Image (tube, rainbow, N blue to C red):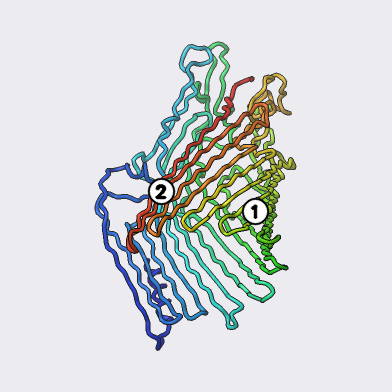
Amino acid sequence: MKKLICVLLVFGLVLPLSAQEATTNWSLGVAGNYTAFGDGYIPKVAEYKYYKDGFFPEMKFNWNRYNGMNKIQLNGAYYNPKEMLFGGDFRLGKSVLADVSYKSFYRNTQLDLLENISARESLNREGTAPGGKILSHEIQNPNEQLGYQRQEIEANLKFLLPGDKITLRASHRTIMEDGKMQHVQNMHCASCHLVSRPLDVKNKTQSLTAGLDAALGVADLSYEVNVRKFISDAGPYSAYYDSAGHPGRGYIWTDPNTGATSNYYVEFGSRLVYHGEDVAIAAYPETNKLSHKITAKSNIGKGRLLLQYQNTTLTNDAQLADPNVTITGDLKVTANNLNGNYSTPLMENTKLILAGKYRRLENEDLSIDNPDWRDNRPGGDIDLDYIRYSSLTRTDLEGSAKVIYQPKRSYRLTALLGFNSVERDNFPIEGANFKTDKTMFELGVRYRPTGKFTGDLKYGLENIDNPFSPVDQMFEMYGRGTLMPTTGAPNVYYWQRDDLRYGNISNMPAMVHNIKATVKVQPNKKVKLDVGLNLKKGSNDTQKELDFQQTTMAPNLGLTLIPNDKVNFFANYTYVKQTQNGLAAVALMDG
């Protein structure tokens, strides 16, 4: 807060005195609130509400001063130690514009009690005793309230060069998150144990933007560069992972019938990357983003053309803390975007709007070096190294044409036809080029006979070819006996069973119908009524194993009353009802 006040004072001091008569206005409001709901109530029902039993003073203020084309405006609101906002706007003639702001709010992140994580195998293989496979959990600090404060400081500056054709601008934003969140550690299957613990949140994002706008007569051009960095000062954290062992027989077991001894600590341990040791957990990325954006606007014939190109590079410079795994390659994503928009009169009372977008995302391939599976064991030394091909790598194309026809002021007709194509280079496997095509159609009408009544009605249709879905992962067919051990392996292992799975299950529709109606009635300046209804129905029966249906109904009602220029009353009610069916694929052995 001290930094913010200093900035405001500096901006205030640079404004010169003027012989013109100045005007000053200010307002101040002081109130308070008292909370006595008891521990744990508000966090359960209010995600973005900070609470502490007791009395909190509240304050709002607004102060502004005008002197010709010079302006200073300060405002703020204080609700409690975690929720507040302050800001200032400044103007020096027509050449300099600046503003600063500070915002803070609190978010309750809840605590999952993991009470649905509790199970045990009913009987062992012989059926003589309870089974050893147990799913259990442990919560450390169960009474600790989890949440974090988010603070944002932003400053913007614009400077108009002499000649009124070129504007320089710069902005800076800092986002800080400080508090605690829940982390759940999942042990490996030897123990099937979950451990919940609170960990610190200490995140910081810095963003710096600089740009130039030029009005050249024949065209308006602008260039913008943005640099953003995210780091976390939390941690490093580590947690102990149990030693590998048999869930029912422990680490070393001797068969009472044969006398043979099995060392499960060594055998099962050879199948795990780590066990019986402290391992780094909850590591944050350290991301750096650099983007360049060029925008051009110009009149072409009777129409207006807008073109925009943006190049973005995102890297993660954090180092992997796991000494057992080696990653080779750059943690880097590159994006190139090209957008275009052209609007022009098509004929009398008719306007045409054409829009298009091209986007190319590339996520670098990574080489992952894992320890050998069952190292130095019979049938072991299997190399599980692989190359990570990202499904984020894709090409995205969009295009649309919209016609607006308005023969009279009282009504307007619109029609839109569009398409969207997304091709994922490496989904579900490298080079598979999974492609989803969408065709969109929309008709709309607006009727406004007077300023007291406005009605809108729209109908939309979407046809989606090959909606995104996991491929061949729905069910497992009968036929485990057809699988053969991999080279050097003594048996068939669970990860090979993916070869038996089939069916593409999706919660994405292949056809969507949408109807949206709104009515606004304003009989006078003191009363305004808004009524609306949104109906949507989606379905997908493109696969013989899938019959997906989803229906959404959302009516809304709004009322605004303005008895005088000092009092406003408004209320809004929205009801959303959604029904959906879906398939559950239960994992079964051997079909």
Q: Position of residue 90 (x, y in %)?
A: 44, 74
At a point 41% along the width and 81% down the height, the residue shown is 67
**Could you say which quadrant of the image residue 56 lies in?**
bottom left
Q: Quadrant of the C terminus?
A: top right
Image position of 545 with respect to 525: above or below: above
Helix, strand or loop under label 2: strand
Comparing 47 with 416, the one in front is: 416
CB under 8 Å between discs 2 and 1: no
The residue sitting at 36% across, 50% down in the picture is: 49
Q: Residue at x 66, y 46 (%)?
A: 441
Residue type beneath disc 1: Val
Per the image, the residue denoted by label 1 is 333
Any part of residue 100 in sight:
yes
- In-image side of 417 versus 103 (left or right): right
Per the image, the residue denoted by label 2 is 572
Residue density around tag 2, few if under 14, some if 14–19, many if 20 or more, within 10 Å? few
Q: Is residue 330 above or below residue 136?
A: below
Residue 223 against residue 141 in the figure, above or below:
below
Question: Could you tell whether 103 is left or right of 546 in the image?
Answer: left
Question: Sequence-wise, which precedes: disc 2 or disc 1?
Answer: 1
Crowd class of label 1 (few under 14; some 14 to 19; many from 20; radius 10 Å):
some
